[in-house]
Image: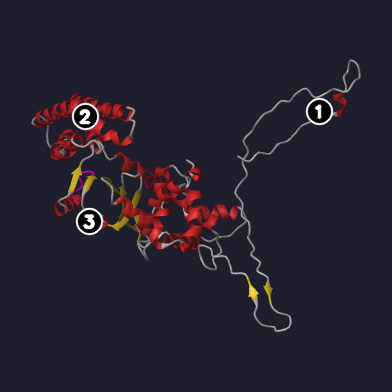
Amino acid sequence: LPRVSRVLEPDADDLICSCCGRAKVRIGEERAEQLDFVPASFRVIETIRPKYACSRCKEGVTVALAPRGPVDKGLATAGLLTHVIVSKYVDHAPLARLATIFGRLGVDVPRQTLCGWVEKVHLLLAAVEAAQWASILTSHVLGADETPVNVLEEGRKQCARGYLWCYVGDQDEVAFDFSMGRRSETPTRALSDYHAGVLVCDAYAGYDELERTKPGLLRTGCMAHARRKVFEAKDVDPDRAMVLLALIRLLYDVEARIQAEPCVVEAQRPLLARALRQQESRPVMERIHEHVERYRAEVLPKSPMGKALGYLHNQWTYLSRFLEDGAIPIDNNRVERALRPVAVGRGNWTFIGSEDAGPWAARLYGLMGTCRLQGINPYTWLKDVLDRVRDHPPDRMHELTPRGWKLARPQAAAVT
């Protein structure tokens, strides 16, 4: 961090020895540090381009080329555009609140102007997001989930239900998609180029179409979803619930040991995971299955415990597939963690302003979320990309994705 040093000298009278009257000499010093904060501030960058011409011919005027910013003749620099995007999609500040903050700093930027800036950044990053999607669709293991969002209907003062769909690849990259409604067409379209691999998801029937139309796709379940349903039945049926929760805990103890086990090469971890799961997790899964089938005959199907047992019974094939492949996670929690910023933001911005703005949120949440997964500063990444994206070769857009950017300059990455 930048440092400002201040030296505090004693009064001149105190530098004279009270015993002998001699001047005191410096014998050392005491140091103390405090952390200070300088509030954000605006500045105006004025670009001056002198013109030159021949004093005799009056022709051939020469002037330097104007610098090319993210937006032609735009008021905002890459730094200001980046601040707006990071404030909204990382720090969860609605644009109306951001306009208020700017006004407090002495600059009037209407919310409509901020919306226009967000749209421009969305368009600038289209090719970068496409390159990231291409990388995600090469994943061996792909996690998927969705969350609802309110969308303001055009010309009305009420909201409709929209959805943000989240997909996380095995290279720590995340992409979002947006749709009005929760139809199966949305994941089918988003994953149209994903033909072979493992899809980790919950029991939502919208993913059934993918399983039917893609023979090379292996679908697996989420033990965290199953556990949550059992936990919700704990107060009504504590005896059965605690037995199942204890057994599921044993499965997660094995997973914790797998992650803690040192591996010379990280690629060997799936082999270790499969061996431990076959040896220790499989017997536990068999015990869980026995309890599920026995309990189902003892409880009402519509009771909380009956619904939890029904979920485990219906999803058992999917829930058991993690035993056969060490690369398959036991649950879909990494996707749920990627969805968390949307849930936090939803409590701040309340609704998406229009159906057209849904894809803006999807693209920017995806790229900002990838920065978090990659452990890089989203401001540093986005400002650099906005300065370069318009002149970057289209066939090398993968270099500007957060993962590609980090690989090219690891020294610039900084966890935030």
- Looking at the rendered image, the disc whose residue lies closer to the viewer, 3 or 2, is 2
Q: Amino acid at mark 2?
A: Ala
| Relative to 314, 246 lies left or right | right
As displayed, is residue 226 above or below residue 101? Answer: above
Scheme of colours in the image: secondary structure
Secondary structure category for the residue under label 3: helix
In the rendered image, residue 313, in percent from the top left (x then y), is placed at: 13, 37
Question: In this orientation, which residue lies closer to the viewer: 364 or 135?
Answer: 135
The residue tagged 1 is 10
Query: Circle 2 sits in a helix, a strand or a loop, which is it?
Result: helix
Task: State the residue in front, 160 or 393.
Answer: 393
In the image, is residue 89 part of the stretch drawn in magenta?
A: no
Disc 3/disc 2 C-alpha distance (Å)? 34 Å
Q: Tell me the number on the disc at residue 344.
A: none
Q: Where is residue 374 drawn, in percent x and y?
A: 41, 43
Relative to 16, does residue 161 appear above or below in the rendering?
Answer: below
- Helix, strand or loop at label 1? It is loop
Q: Indicate which disc, 1 or 2, sits on the residue closer to the N terminus.
A: 1
Q: Is residue 353 visible?
A: no
Residue topped by disc 2: 275
- The x, y position of residue 347, in whole percent, is 40, 47
- Quadrant placement of the N terminus: top right
How far is the residue under mark 1 from the one under mark 3? 75 Å
**N-term mark: 3 or 2:** 3
Magenta span of residues:
200-205
